[in-house]
Each structure stands twice: as C-alpha cells, then as structure tokens.
Image (tube, rainbow, N blue to C red):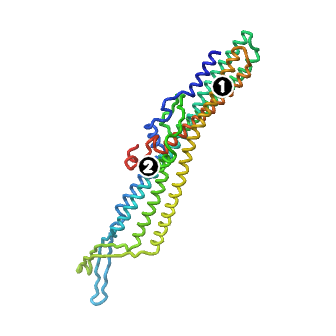
Amino acid sequence: MNAVRTLTFALALAFAAQAPADYLPAPAAAEAALWASPMVMQARGEFAAQMFKSQGLQHGREEWTVGTDVAQRRIQTMPGDSRSEWGVALSRPLRLPARAAADRALAGALTAHAEANLGEALHESGRQLLALWFDWLGEASQELLWQAQRDLAEQQLATVNARIRLGEAPRAERVNAEAALAQVRLQQQQSATRAQQARSRLLAHYPALAVKADGGLPPPAPPAGSAEAYVEAVLEHNHELARARRQAEALQAEARQLGRRRGVDPSVGVFYKSEAGGDERVLGLSVGLTLPGAARRTDQQAAGQLSATAQEAAAQLEQRLRQEARADFETAVAQAADWQQAERAAQALEESARLAERAYGLGEGSLDQVLLTRRLALEGWVQARQAQVVALAADARLKLDAHQLWPLDVGADDAHAHP
C-alpha cells in the first residue's frame, strides 16, 4: 500500500502545484498563427483592395475625353462644290475643391473602416484560437489524470493479489480490482481519443502552431482590478465597436460626398476644326455644365439615412459590449471561486480515499469501500481539473479582450508587414 499512497500523494500535488507560465502559446507564435489564419488573410486582402479604391477616390475619377468628327460639306448653289471637313476635341470634367475634399474624406473613412475590419478579424481569430486551445488543453489534462488513475488501479490490483497470496483477502476481491482497472483503462483510452481529436481540430485551423502540454496548470486567480476598469479597457480596444463606428463615419462621409455632387458638374476642353476644305480653321475653348437631377438628391438622402442608422447601431453596440464585458469579468471571478471550492472538495475526497486505503492495508475495512472512495476522489479531481481549465480560459479571454495577452492592434504598416 505504500506505492498506492505515494501515487495518490503525487496526484494531489500535481493539481495543487504551480506550473510554468507557458501553458498558453507563446506571444510570437500566437501572433504568427493569427496572421496566417484564413479569416485574417481574407480581411487583409479586403484591406489591400480598399487601399487601392481609396487612392482612386483621392486622385478623382475625372478623365480626359478625346473626340473627333469627319464631315463632307456640299454646296448646292452654283457653282456646286463639295468640301471635306474634320475636327478634334479634348475635354475633361473639373473636380471643384469642395468635392475633392469630400472625396479625400470618404477615402480616409473607408480605409479606416477596412483597418478596423482587419482588427476585428484578428481579434475573432484570437478568440477562436483560445477556444480551441483550451478545448485541447482540457482534454489533454484529463488524459494525464486518467493515466495517473490507471497507475493507481494497477497498484491496487497488485496489493489485492499480495493479500490473497498471504491469505488475508478472498479471491473475489481480485475480480473487483480487475473490473475497476478495466474501467479506468477504458476511460483513459477514451480520454486519449478525445485529446487527439481536440488537437487535430486545433491544428486544422492553426497548422503552424506548436501544440504541446507538460501536464501542469497554474492555479487560477481572480482577475485583477475592478470591473469598471476592465470594461473601459475592453471598450478602448474593442475592434467590433471600432468597426461599427468607422462604418458610421464612412457612411456619413459618403453622404457629404453625395451632397457635394448635387451641384453642377463643369467640364472644359479645347477643339480644333478644319472647314471649307482647309480654307477655314477654327481653334476654340469649350465649357459644359452637367445639371444634377433628382437621383443625386435621393442618393444623398439614402446615404444620410444609412449613416444615422449606423450611428444608432454603434451606440447600441457600445451598451451591449459594456454589459457583456462586465458579465465576463464577474463570470471570471465566479469561476476562480468555483475552482477553489472544487479543489478543496477534491482534496477532502482524496484524504477520505487515502484513509480507506490505509485501513484496508491494515486489514480493516473492505475493498468495496476502497474502490468507492477512490471513485469519488477521482470524480472530485475530474471536476476540479475541469473547473481549473474553465477558470484559466475565462482569465485568458479577459486578457485577450483587453489586449493584454497577444498583440492585436493593427495599422496600415502592420497589415502589409506580415506575410
């Protein structure tokens, strides 16, 4: 029974001891994995496309127009005559300063919206990575737990066999011990399968990420600071809210641009004509005005309505994000407390199992009592490990949303710097 007690004590220490701080992916590896994810790569492509579109808006869409005409003039009066005539013209619409400024403002707003969309994609990819990572980490930790339990069950069977050889226990106890060992081996095998499946799902989304576990997890701690400070930190860096605000600003800039387009569109050009068979030559300047119609007014009204709607949606989104951030903080606090309670319960159940095994080793009690207390202790450790992983995941999510875990802020330089 000394070997059983040694393994039991080691199992308890494995849950209580602090682990290295590298149970999460390294920041550099996580950043590279996020930038290589399909979600972020698509957002990067959309950002690059929007950069080209914004450059087009800044340069303006007014272009030169070249025209020519060829004619044959016939003179019916006597003496009749027929003369060739031709002409060429070059013209271009003019972009007035106010319209040019509105176009540049719209270009900047659209670029900012695309940048915010890239940041949101990076943030969502980070959330997905955390979810898949802790899913695998939880299954991997359960597999290690069942391995330890298998060792305990094997030691228990060895103890029962030793007592049978000494005539201190009936042979029927061997059947119970072997059945308990078979159940633990089945659970360990199923746990290993679930861990492998979780690892495969993680690598399917982030194939370049190094996935390894040393079996140790740190004790979860309640989040530092106050809920109010956390809410403000989340809103300061929230990409979803930034994207909604940038969208409202882009629609507002589009409404202003369409308002500038409700004025007349001037164009200026030069022309040259050869008439009367080349006897007359004309060089002139042409000026034109395109008068706006009702469509421009309705386009501006539609953009204004969309802008107002987007602004209201951004305000409502801010309120929802405030409530969600506060709820996430309170949940993380509660889950850290849940783990502490589960840990205390598991330790108490482990002590009960230890005492039952000790009594059995001294010839007191029964094997059924030992197996029952060991099963209860195992259930306690399973719940404690699950609560531990859940609490650590909640803490990591808080840090991710507050931009304290991995670098998630992006800019134009960052979007082009990553491969």
**Circle 1 — which element?**
helix
Q: What residue sits 31% from the left and 82% below the top? A: 73
Q: Please, which residue is most extreme toward the top here?
A: 166
Q: Please name the residue that numbered disc 2 is placed on.
A: 44
Going by the image, does 356 lie left or right of 199? right
Going by the image, does 118 lie left or right of 333? left
> How far is the residue under mark 1 from the one under mark 2?
48 Å
Mark 2 neighbour density, 10 Å: few (under 14) some (14–19) many (20 or more): many
State the image coordinates of residue 31 (x, y, percent, origin top left): 44, 40
State the image coordinates of residue 281 (x, y, percent, origin top left): 24, 78
Q: Nearer the viewer, residue 117 or 265?
A: 117
Q: In which quarter of the image is residue 369?
A: top right
Quadrant in which the C terminus appears: top left
Q: The residue under label 1 is which amino acid type?
A: Arg
Q: Is residue 370 above or below residue 103?
A: above
Q: Please name the residue that numbered disc 1 is placed on.
A: 185
